[in-house]
Amino acid sequence: MFFVPAPGETEQPRQLGGDADWWRGGVIYQIYPRSFLDMNGDGIGDLPGISARLDYIAGLGVDAIWISPFFTSPMLDFGYDVSNYRDVDPMFGKLEDFDTLLEGAHKRGLRVMLDLVLSHTSDKHPWFQESRFDRSNPRHDWYVWADPKPDGTPPTNWLSIFGGSAWEWDSRRRQYYLHNFLTSQPDLNFHNPAVQEALLDVVRFWLDRGVDGFRLDTVNMYFHDAALRDNPPIGPGDVVNGMPEQNPYSMQNPIYNITRPENLQFMERLRAVMDAYPATTTVGEIGCVTDMYGTLAEYTSGSTRLHMAYSFDYMSAKFSAAHIRRVSERMAAQEYSWPSWAFSNHDVERVVSRWGLSQHADRAGPLLAALLTSLRGSPCLYQGEELGLTEAVVPYELLRDPYGIRFWPDFKGRDGCRTPMPWNAAAAHGGFSDGQPWLPLPPDHVERAVSVQDAAPLSPLNRVRAFLAWRRERPALLKGAIAFHDAPEPVVAFTRTHGDARLLCVFNLGAAPAGFDTGGFGPISPAGGHGFNGALSGAGVALEPFDAFFATY
């Protein structure tokens, strides 16, 4: 049966380790709090809901949780429009609820990372309210303001990711302000040292409270070009990483509105703050660039910038063994870089649907989780991936995502990956809430609830648990180097090496049996206990559909 601990009852605690580099190879579990568990019946998940499921999270075998924004916000972009960085929005609870969550996580050996949005705030933030009052107030230049062109049009051709111009007219100041996202999300002016210091103080506030790190939203979008130069058109063969072609943003090369060289200097200031708090980490979201690998390397080079960063290369519709290899090898070739990988998150279609594997979710889900957590880097597992959840179909009239509403029907938005977690198939709304959920739970998700999978030894949930427990004892999978081997589609094969330990990892990404030739490896010793059925067969490995094989040699 699905175990719900009584108040004060926990599993055997797993203490936090002393490894300052715990993040290097650590598994990070992303929680979208609105959709995790609702404890007060208002249909929206909250911080007490996360606390109530800490035993479940620890039981997965992950090392940390990343919590999407829960700060005070008007919620026009569901928390990514912050109006108070130092408090909890009432819909999620109180600051004391966060302290309880943090304490409970640490007791179970779980680190806690916060999703920090520094590039912009809500237009309801007191800083912006003061800044827009006139052109002479103390915070008049805390945001990016600019005069119109002589004909009244915006200062540059820069576009908003959410559609239209990136400039919005303000009649009081008779100037435009910059917004890379919604008009209600004005961009902060990082060219102002006071802005930088105010944001670093926000970082210190949460570190002093005991958090273990940050996922930094849009980390390459902090600075803009002070000369306000127009972006050029996208070059032949270039692609704006992570941007769908339906969005005109994909038609510009965004070299002036984002990813400016000054950003790297701020990364160094931020890292200096982090280094004053041992065993903390940062993972940056880098998107909307044409040179993804070079940018990732720049942002993570040496020990003075970000600890790690991730791209959207594995969060597109591209799916093949060759693509998996190409992305990982190109990242591994960047000196000093340590990547963070994800196949799904709160911004993209769930992976089993995006890669056309919905009908094979029971087998493909665990296989993809094993592949993700076997690549060199720090994997992020999005809530529900352990259940093999597919993308939900949310009808237009129930959409909440402003991005999806703006580009419907060619782009369905992000609501389909944000529907609530199904906990108990026998309870109303899948056990997520006693009230009407903010987004509907699909019936097929309820059928895959934790209560159902918990009782089935070979369910995706239990297979993911078993694999992560097995992985935890293998340093080569945590911090080792990676070297790929030639293999026929749809097989991915590589070796992870740590010290004298070498672990061969082979994955069949297809729905038909496949094989891999091991004739050139010499004697190999198959490893067991990971939950997959790949086996030696003659001079090679025989793999069932969506199967894996591991061996030392």
Image: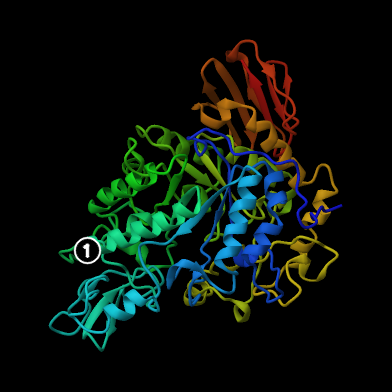
> What is the x, y in percent for residue 469?
69, 35
Q: Nearer the viewer, residue 38 or 94?
A: 94
Horizontally, residue 322 falls left or right of residue 537, namely: left
Q: Is residue 202 visible?
A: yes
Q: In the rendering, at what x and y percent does residue 360 appear?
A: 72, 49
Task: Please determine whether, in this image, residue 181 is positioned above or below residue 116.
Answer: below
Which residue is tagged 1? 192
Instruction: Please tell me which residue is depicted at 52% across the width and 71% down the height of the picture.
Output: 78
The correct choice, above or below, for 427 with respect to 355 in the image is below
Q: Is residue 287 above or below residue 508?
A: below
Q: Residue at x 34, y 55 (%)?
A: 220
Question: Seen in the image, is 175 located left or right of residue 376?
Answer: left
Q: Is residue 510 visible?
A: no
174 or 239, which is in the foreground? 174
| Kind of residue indicated by mark 1 | Asn
Instruction: Please rate how many residues cluster around mark 1, counting C-alpha atoms within 10 Å: few if below 14, some from 14 to 19, many from 20.
Output: some
Point out the residue furthest to the top here.
522
Q: Nearer the viewer, residue 540 or 87?
A: 87
